[in-house]
Amino acid sequence: MSKIDRLCDQLGIKIVPYRKRRRPRQTHARQVMRRIVLKHGDGHLLFVLKAILWSRNNTAELWSETILAVSDIVLDFPEWADARAGEFMNAIAAIELAEIRRQAMTGRRFSKRSRIYILLVMALRDALTPEQQGSLL
């Protein structure tokens, strides 16, 4: 069992082959998760995956682009992971990641990852109180 498999197993995530349709708590994103662990460590990946899985509504949103966009946000706003992890998790849980992804699919000018990132930052700005927003203001 690989390191990524063990990390996913801790969270009840199953990595399935690309040819198989995904269900909630399943992903095809093995390579993306491997890159995140190599670049930023196990803890970072676990935090990102927990943020996505925090809400039952988002358990089917373990797409590569979504995982990368949430990772980018955690890296760009480290104060959330350090001091405001609970508020950040609750704010992500209040956002319908499937709707964010649907909106991001309509544009072609930027990558899906970038569009998801932008829409998610805007949604987080609206979901967090001014004290929680920190550097977003």
Image (tube, helix red, strand yellow):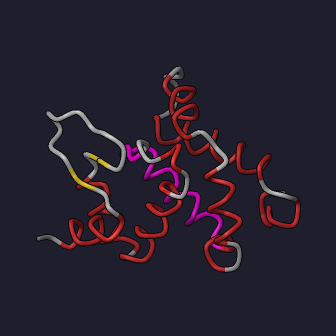
Outermost right residue: 130
Q: Residue at x 30, y 48 (%)?
A: 26
Image position, residue 22 (x, y; %): 27, 38
The picture quadrant where one finds residue 31 is bottom left
Q: Quadrant of the N terminus?
A: bottom left
- How many marks on residues? 0
Seen at 47% across and 56% down, the residue is 53
Farthest residue in the left direction? 1
Name the chief secondary structure element in magenta: helix
Q: Is residue 114 magenta?
A: no
Nearer to us in this view, 97 or 119: 97
User: Residue 71 in the image: x percent, y percent?
Assistant: 49, 59
In depth, the one of 56 and 111 nearer the eye is 56
Vertical comparison of 101 with 68: above or below: above
- Which residue extends farthest front? 56
> Is 23 situated left or right of 81 in this image?
left
Task: Give the residue displayed 14% in from the left and 33% down from the top.
Answer: 19
Quick one: quadrant of the C terminus? Answer: bottom right
Q: Is residue 21 above or below residue 4?
A: above
On the image, the x and y values in percent for residue 66 come to: 46, 46
Write down the quadrant of residue 85 in the picture. bottom right
Q: Which residues lie in the magenta part?
A: 62-78
State left or right for residue 28 relative to residue 76.
Answer: left
Residue positioned 29% across, 47% down in the render: 27
Instruction: State the image coordinates of residue 126 (x, y, percent, origin top left).
Output: 79, 46
On the picture, is 22 further left or further right than 123?
left
